[in-house]
Image (cartoon, helix red, strand yellow):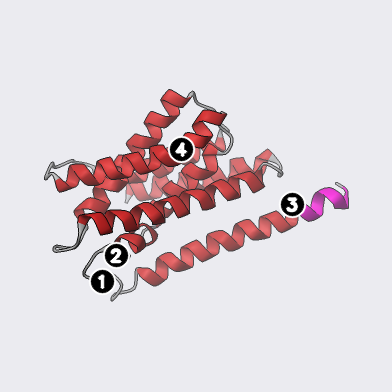
């Protein structure tokens, strides 16, 4: 392999690892006692909530990562499917509807998106969009049930929508960088995500 190929890939890999390290560090920091309910109005709580769980971070980031290799409609529509699913899930929780197996569903979303990345799967927009939205309903439901009593629903929702979009677009950026690398790196990364999802599901 010549230097022209090795150098960009090396820089890209370092950026990838640094970004994931920062995301994981943020998760651990906000998971520390005292960060659970930062403000009474709910906005900051909603903003931080998606960053407080490895399952949320991986699912949202991995969906963004996977979407970058999809057809144009799916690629452009993924942020809308993500947010639509999140809001729908939170709305179901706020209506008082009880859904069983949410934690398992969240873990399975991580596992399945990892598999999609590892296999370089490309799905039709109708199938991919529905799958992404269903994954995010589980995440949105969890967010909705964990909103502090007395918080503003609108502010809380605004917070987690912004955070979710940010994580998804970080994933898309990493996915775009990985387009320049050997596909084996993407497959390996997808495998790691899938394994973590499996561990979360088993736990």
Lateral position of residue 179 relative to residue 202, left or right: right
Report the predominant secondary structure element of the magenta stretch.
helix
* Disc nearest the viewer among 3 and 2: 2
CA gap between label 1 and label 4 equals: 30 Å
Indicate which disc, 4 or 2, sits on the residue closer to the N terminus: 2
Q: Which element type, helix, strand or loop, lies under badge 2?
A: helix
Task: Report the disc number at residue 45.
Answer: 2
Question: Residue 38, image x and y in percent?
Answer: 28, 72
Question: Residue 170, image x and y in percent?
Answer: 53, 53
CA gap between label 3 and label 1 equals: 42 Å
- Quadrant of residue 111 within the rendered picture: top left
Is the residue under label 2 in contact with that under label 4 (CB below 8 Å)? no
Q: Which element type, helix, strand or loop, lies under badge 3?
A: helix
Can you identify the residue that label 4 sits on? 78
Q: Which residues are magenta?
A: 2-9
Q: Which element type, helix, strand or loop, lies under badge 1?
A: loop
Can you identify the residue that label 3 sits on? 9
Classed neighbour count for the residue bearing mark 1: other residues with Cα under 10 Å, few (<14), some (14–19), many (≥20): few
Residue pictured at 29% horizontal, 75% vertical: 33
Indicate which disc, 3 or 4, sits on the residue closer to the N terminus: 3
Indicate which disc, 3 or 1, sits on the residue closer to the N terminus: 3
Which residue lies most toward the bottom here? 34
Can you identify the residue that label 1 sits on? 39
Which residue lies most toward the right here? 2
Q: Is residue 33 magenta?
A: no
Is the residue under label 1 in contact with that under label 2 (CB below 8 Å)? yes
Question: Residue 101, image x and y in percent?
Answer: 23, 42
Indicate which disc, 2 or 1, sits on the residue closer to the N terminus: 1
CA gap between label 4 and label 2 equals: 24 Å
Residue pictured at 41% horizontal, 44% vertical: 110
Residue pictured at 58% horizontal, 33% vertical: 120
CA gap between label 3 and label 4 equals: 26 Å
């Amino acid at each position: 392999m010549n230097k022209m190929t090795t150098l960009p890939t090396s820089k890209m890999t370092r950026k990838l690892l640094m970004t994931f390290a920062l995301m994981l560090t943020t998760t651990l920091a906000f998971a520390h006692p005292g960060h659970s309910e930062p403000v009474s109005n709910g906005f900051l709580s909603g903003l931080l909530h998606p960053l407080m769980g490895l399952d949320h971070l991986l699912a949202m980031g991995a969906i963004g990562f996977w979407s970058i290799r999809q057809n144009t409609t799916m690629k452009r529509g993924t942020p809308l499917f993500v947010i639509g699913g999140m809001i729908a899930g939170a709305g179901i929780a706020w209506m008082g509807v009880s859904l069983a197996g949410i934690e398992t569903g969240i873990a399975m979303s991580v596992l399945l998106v990892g598999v999609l990345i590892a296999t370089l799967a490309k799905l039709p927009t109708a199938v991919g969009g529905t799958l992404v939205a269903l994954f995010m309903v589980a995440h949105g439901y969890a967010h909705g049930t964990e909103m502090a009593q007395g918080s503003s629903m609108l502010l809380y929702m605004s917070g987690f929508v912004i955070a979710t979009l940010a994580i998804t677009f970080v994933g898309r950026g990493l996915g775009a960088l990985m387009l320049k690398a050997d596909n084996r790196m993407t497959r390996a990364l997808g495998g790691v995500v899938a394994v973590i999802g499996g561990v979360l599901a088993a736990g």
